[in-house]
Image: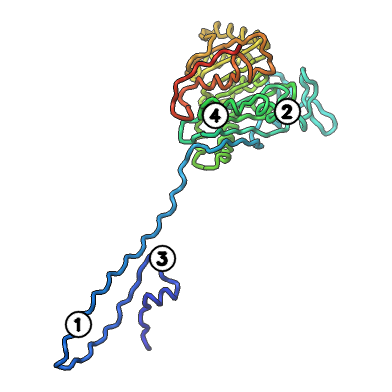
């Protein structure tokens, strides 16, 4: 049987087996030198062959894009699996089911202030407003601001447009994101829905972190959102979910602070008991005429429990600081999120939180009081 000679480099290329960047060369077969006559001149020495060029080094894989500050803001209104509504449970401490009105196939809830609201119209919106400001940097310490709206509100018309909550978070200068769930839609009702249930708020925070990472557009940012401390900001009727989260939400390990804006209107013992436990979080309650009586009662409850507080906003909101801020009597309750003792009060309060700057620290500028 005739034995096959090994493939040369040319043959390998033709066979498609030469790896990119490799060099394959088989030695040429030896050829005996031809006989020379005795008187023939000595053959010239062969010219030196040029040195073989080295194979090109393989190109390194493109480096993965590094995390960088957000080049533009991102806002989204997304349905969540874990949301305050729909809710088919009981009203806590009332010994009655939440959906206590039935008409044919429809179910509804009776509100003392607003009458009957139907589940399909008022208690079925599972959307959450998310906002990541321009310049947010997932490499820096981050904060999650969770905003609870008041009565007769929708996320687009009121939280985003009228109260400008995303803008206030962005202009605070904090490396913070906004999460705002929809409660009862455009209704005179402060019900917390599933946030009445122990532990549901922590599940909501986990889903919010995942959704924020998706909105951010880079999975490597997921840890920044899951580990971000939380500040709850509750306006008006948003006090109700805030109170039950402090009472049994099982989120104390995440809470960095609570901000009440012209609230609360009930559940004072829950706020007082939480503050009496000396949680590692700050508490600010700014109020006008509407919530003045309840804030006076809450201060009395704290004094009875030996909890100290102050009546001005501290320069820096540290863990354990408690402040009550009285706004002018002429301030309208409906405008309190944008016009209180100062304009844009949420922005002003957030600016007092140290350790979460979106950029290098700059000297603080005193905020002029509202005239």
Outermost residue to the left? 39
SS class, disc 4: strand
Looking at the image, is mark 2 or mark 3 earlier in the sequence?
A: 3
Find the distance from the CA under tag 1 to the CA under tag 3.
Answer: 39 Å
Q: Position of residue 308 (x, y in %)?
A: 51, 9
SS class, disc 2: loop
Name the image quarter holding residue 206. Answer: top right
Q: Residue at x 58, y 39 (%)?
A: 215
Pointer 2 residue = 185
Q: Position of residue 31 (x, y in %)?
A: 26, 86
Left or right? Give the position of 290 relative to 224.
right
The mark closer to the camera, 1 or 3, is: 1
Pointer 3 residue = 20
Looking at the image, is mark 4 or mark 1 earlier in the sequence?
A: 1
Q: Nearer the viewer, residue 209 or 248?
A: 209
Find the distance from the CA under tag 2 to the CA under tag 3.
Answer: 63 Å
């Amino acid at each position: 049987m005739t034995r096959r000679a090994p493939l040369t480099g040319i043959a390998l290329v033709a066979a498609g087996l030469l790896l990119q960047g490799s060099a394959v060369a088989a030695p040429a077969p030896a050829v005996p030198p031809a006989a020379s006559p005795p008187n023939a001149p000595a053959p010239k020495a062969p010219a030196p062959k040029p040195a073989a060029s080295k194979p090109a080094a393989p190109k390194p894989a493109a480096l993965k894009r590094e995390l960088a500050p957000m080049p533009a803001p991102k806002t989204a209104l997304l349905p969540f699996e874990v949301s305050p509504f729909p809710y088919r449970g009981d009203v806590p401490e009332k010994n009655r089911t939440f959906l206590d009105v039935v008409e044919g196939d429809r179910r509804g809830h009776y509100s003392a202030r607003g009458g009957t609201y139907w589940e399909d119209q008022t208690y079925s919106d599972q959307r959450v407003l998310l906002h990541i400001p321009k310049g947010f940097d997932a490499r820096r310490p981050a904060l999650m601001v969770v905003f609870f709206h008041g009565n007769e509100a929708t996320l687009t018309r009121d939280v985003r447009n009228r109260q400008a909550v995303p803008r206030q978070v962005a202009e605070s200068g904090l490396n913070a994101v906004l999460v705002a769930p929809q409660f009862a839609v455009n209704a005179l009702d402060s019900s917390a829905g599933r946030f009445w249930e122990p532990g549901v708020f922590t599940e909501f925070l986990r889903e919010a972190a995942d959704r924020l990472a998706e909105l951010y557009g880079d999975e490597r940012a997921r840890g920044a959102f899951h580990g971000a401390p939380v500040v709850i900001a509750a306006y008006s009727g948003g006090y109700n979910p805030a109170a039950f989260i402090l009472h049994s939400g099982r989120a104390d390990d995440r809470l960095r602070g609570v901000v009440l804006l012209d609230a609360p209107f009930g559940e004072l013992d829950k706020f007082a008991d939480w503050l009496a436990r000396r949680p590692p979080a700050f508490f600010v309650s700014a109020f006008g005429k509407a919530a003045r009586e309840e804030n006076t009662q809450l201060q009395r409850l704290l004094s009875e429990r030996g909890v100290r507080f102050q009546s001005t906003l501290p320069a820096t909101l540290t863990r354990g600081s408690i402040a009550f801020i009285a706004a002018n009597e002429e301030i309208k309750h409906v405008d309190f999120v944008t016009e209180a003792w100062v304009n844009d009060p949420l922005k002003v309060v957030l600016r007092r939180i140290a350790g979460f700057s979106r950029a290098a620290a700059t000297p603080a500028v005193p905020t002029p009081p509202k005239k």
